[in-house]
Amino acid sequence: MALSSTSETVAGSKPAASRGLTTRRREMIAGYLFVAPDALGLLIFVGLPMLLSLGVSVFDVDGFGSFEFVGLANYQKMLVDPLFWSSLRVTVQFAVMLVPLLYVVGLGLALLVQRTSKVNTVLRAMFFAPQMISLVVVALVFQLMVVDKLGVLPRSLSFLGVGGLSLLGNPSLALFTVTVAAVWFLMGFYMLIFLGGLQDIPREYYEAARIDGAGRAQSFWNITLPLLRPTSFFVLIVSTVAAVTGAQAFDLVYVMTKGGPANSTSLLISYIYQQAFQYSAFGYASAIATLLVVLLLVITVFFYLITKGGRFQYD
Amino acid sequence: MTDTAAPTLPASRMRLDTVGVVWLLVACILALMAIFPLLYMLSIAFKGPTDVFKPDLIPPRPTLDNFVYVLTEVPFWRYLINTFIVSAVVTVLALFFHTMAGYALARLRFPGRETLFLAMFSTFLVSLPVIIVPLFILVRALGFLNTWQGLIIPAIFNAFGIFLLRQYYLSLPRELEEAAIIDGAGYWRIYWSVILPLSRPIIAALAILFFLANWNGFLWPLTVASDQGLWLVQVAIANFKNQYSASWNYTMAASTIVALPMLILFLVFQRQIMDSIKTSGLKG
Amino acid sequence: MSLKTNLPAGWSRRSLLKGGAALGAGLAAAPLLGRSAFAQDTTLDFWQFYAPDGEVKSQVDWFVKMVDDYNATMDPKVKLTYVVNTEYMNGTKLATSFASGQGPDIFIISPGDFLRYYNGGVLADLTPHIDAAAQADFPETVIANRMVDGKIYGIPMEVEPMAFYYSVKAFEDAGLNENDVPQSWDQLLELGQKLTNADRYGLLFETNPGYYQNFTWYPFMWQGGGEFQTAEGKSAYDSPATVGALKLWQDAVNSGAAPRQVLGGGGGDIVANLGSGYCAIQNVGIWGISAMDNNAPDVPYGIFKLPVPTGGKYVTVGGGWAFVANSKGKNPEAAAKFIAWALASMDPGSVQRVVDWCTVAKSDMPPRNSALEAGKEAFNKGNLAKFANDIHPGTRAEPRVPPEVYKIISDSIQAAMLGGTDPQAAATAASQQLDAFLASYTGAPLL
């Protein structure tokens, strides 16, 4: 009833059937138009460079304007380049340290402050505060704190009996120190994600468990963790991508260690950067970058399929 | 505390309180450790050059000299203004475009929608250092080097915001929109008068996040704007360390100045920010 | 709620289209706006990290005066563009500019970078603009690493030998004086350990990987008679001299005398390290004199030349940046003319300019015999005299190598010094990589 009356009041109204088509088409057009600016922008400023990167990767570019088509030579060079493999290894090491640490710290902090209270509000803000300063400043402050002998951290460590450690100068420790800086920076963000997930778990489950005599640990393993699965997925995937692309690590390494000592913090992303800007080997750098992009695309697709169209429902 | 419940209840409640207090203490200690580096930065900012490595957290002879130096000897005001302009413009434009795109991807039906979303989302994983060389070449070809456009335009397009907004719109109840459609409102009208007002909480939070991300941006401004007149604050700080050697106190003073606006914004808006992040990623 | 379907819809579509058109127009117009910022002019752009925004006034003045004097009578004019030194050396600005064909017309390079630019074909030949007398005025050791096939591609502005600086106070506290400076490597290590305490390291070498670290390490290899390539172009890196040099740096760190991390701008930053009391002895170059005098005037210091290993011969390395012209720039001829006029003319003004740079703006050794002669009074004063008489004789020019070779050598130093790798193993591995690279290398010769 309402529909037909509307069709009569609309100026220049069309019969019901074609009005349905027009509505559909209008929706389509609106859809495209609404998406257009972002789609175009992403296409031009992300998609196009990605394609360009692929294009440049089959050339040998000397950084001064001359280039020569070399087909897959850059990719072959990658396979036998020990520095490529070592930076890949460092990236994997970084991811293997960062992802579990972020998960545990994020979840741990969320569990600590999950109850709503004034104190917890303040504590949450304190844990989130590191996100407010830039990575450059994080790197500078950390660097200052770990200066050999004189910095606050080495001094405290000596005081506790563990003297003589060089946190950024020792190849076995440098990557860990960078990871700690990254965790410190990111933990507040992941804490919030977990808080959101925890709050979705109905209180009744816990009460029922308590009535049944379950202890804290049991509640945790049998209620909390399983119901946190969608959140866990989100956290794991997002932090893995962050680790592999090295978005945070790049800034930290650039300021703190420049890839040293002895290449122990030389991530794939730093290697790409180095090849492009210190060696002027833009072709080779693009080849490595393309490989990284392909890797990430695979992860995206995997992620998308696992979460069934990005809706994060766990059946 | 009178209670008629079984005798075990008060005992268990007391046990919970003790445990609760212990956890609270742990949380407080961790929180202090979490903000320690920030306190450290503040403390060095007020110290004179010879006191930098002295172990005391409270400067023995606190001085404002470092701040004075940073603000007068270096055109830091200029950098702060530059960064503010860039961050504000990017935030406004980004919110505008992303809400439109998010709404379309969540609610409007058109062929290729899901593929388009996947394609757009996949760019989320491409971080700047991976595309910096071709992006630089592209920006140069467009004539955007050392210009405001070069600083602003590439920074607008980031799939993360689109993703969050789409999630948000997916979870909005359809009734209001459906009512508007039945009333015959056009899609732009729906977007403007129905969707946007409903998005206020998430827009507020995203505004802060985008502003923050641009305020703290480093690599892109470093690459595209080498003219000192167009420097943004993080670039200035990074160069500070190298230009004014042995001047940890200056660097920390500069860092404090730069971090301060964001910290204040955060303190004021923390509820909105944190609430939005909490609810954005997960509602199906 | 209004029920008018068509009007709002039409309005919305139109406004969207309008908005889109505006955006498109804006994007299209932007290149024009952008390009107007790059006025099409003939001014030669001179990129360096000294002026006009540099920190040291005397250096700024030198550059500004030079350019003003040139612009007073010559065309096209020269303009100074300041790039912060770390951005210049480690950043993206130069690489991205050259990659996109927008490199500067005149700029400065270090010997370490020479081959990358030469092999890339962007260095203009300066020889036609320099007369024979001037060419002879530059000693072979100084100019050789900027020459290829007898042609000059860069004019050095300075020679910066490396030495050791020590804190007088640290010495006095340990009951030592200037007669106790070490003469041998063993003495150096011993002294370094002696001067190490809870708040300070005794000895400091550069730890950050980079061209600078390689540069400071080379003389230690040379002192033992080592080289990185033979006359036939094969690797000579695997030698006792190399191993000894790597071991020296490794021992310094392992014994706790030398830090694994340096402060401030790196090992070349004397004020942040020696000046702040972080170390007692620092391996740094001649520029340390003016740096300390200007920025840490309250810290008394002494200088001694590099100690030698047993059976070794004294040699030190001399760095020094050079002016070069971009052969793909606006006007390479004019750029070359400027460089020749500024630094490589027998005109007394040019010679004096070199003297002024080395004695007033900085404390450096001059790259030209005539300048050494003209400024001999200044070169015989104070700490500069120590360099002129004691340290500089025996200076060998910084090697020029392509980035791949730089990396091979850098990795071996890093591995031995910080990674704990056995020096012999590091040397052998590097040598094999060096051989592999040299076998297929076709650019200008390494020196």
Image (tube, rainbow, N blue to C red):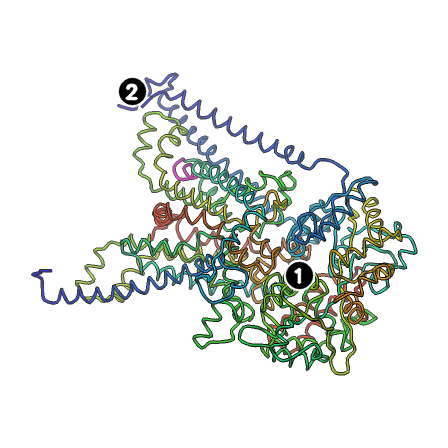
Magenta segment includes C95: no
Question: Where in the figure is residue A163, as x and y percent of width and height?
Answer: 49, 76
Lower position in the chain sequence, tag 1 or tag 2: 2
Mark yes or no: residue C316 visible.
yes
**Residue at mark 2:** A5
Quadrant showing the N terminus of chain C: top left
Q: Is residue C2 above or below residue B246?
A: above
Q: Looking at the picture, do discs 1 and 2 lie on one chain?
A: yes
Q: Chain of mark 1?
A: A
The image quadrant where one finds the C terminus of chain C is bottom right
Q: Callout 2: few (<14), some (14-19), or many (20+) C-alpha neighbours within 10 Å? A: few
Tag 2 secondary structure: helix
Magenta stretch: give its range: B101-108
- Residue A40: percent from left, percent from top: 53, 38
Of residue C126 and residue B243, the one placed in the foreground of this image is B243
Return the residue at label 1.
A77
Q: Amino acid at mark 1?
A: Lys
Q: Are marks 1 and 2 in contact (CB under 8 Å)?
A: no
Please, which chain is the residue tagged with disc 2 on?
A
Q: Position of residue C2 (x, y in %)?
A: 33, 21
Q: Is residue C243 visible?
A: no
Q: How crowded is the residue under tag 1: few (<14 C-alpha within 10 Å), some, or many (20+)?
A: few
Q: CA distance from mark 1 to mark 2?
A: 72 Å
Secondary structure mostly taken by the magenta-highlighted segment of the chain: helix
Position in image of residue C229 (x %, y %): 78, 70
Instruction: Give amino acid for label 2.
Output: Ser
Q: Residue at x 79, y 55 (%)?
A: C356
Q: Nearer the viewer, residue A102 or C340?
A: C340
Residue C135, by quadrant, is bottom right
What residue is shown at x 21% (from left), y 65% (from top)? B16
- Judge depth for marks 1 and 2 and give the one in front: 1
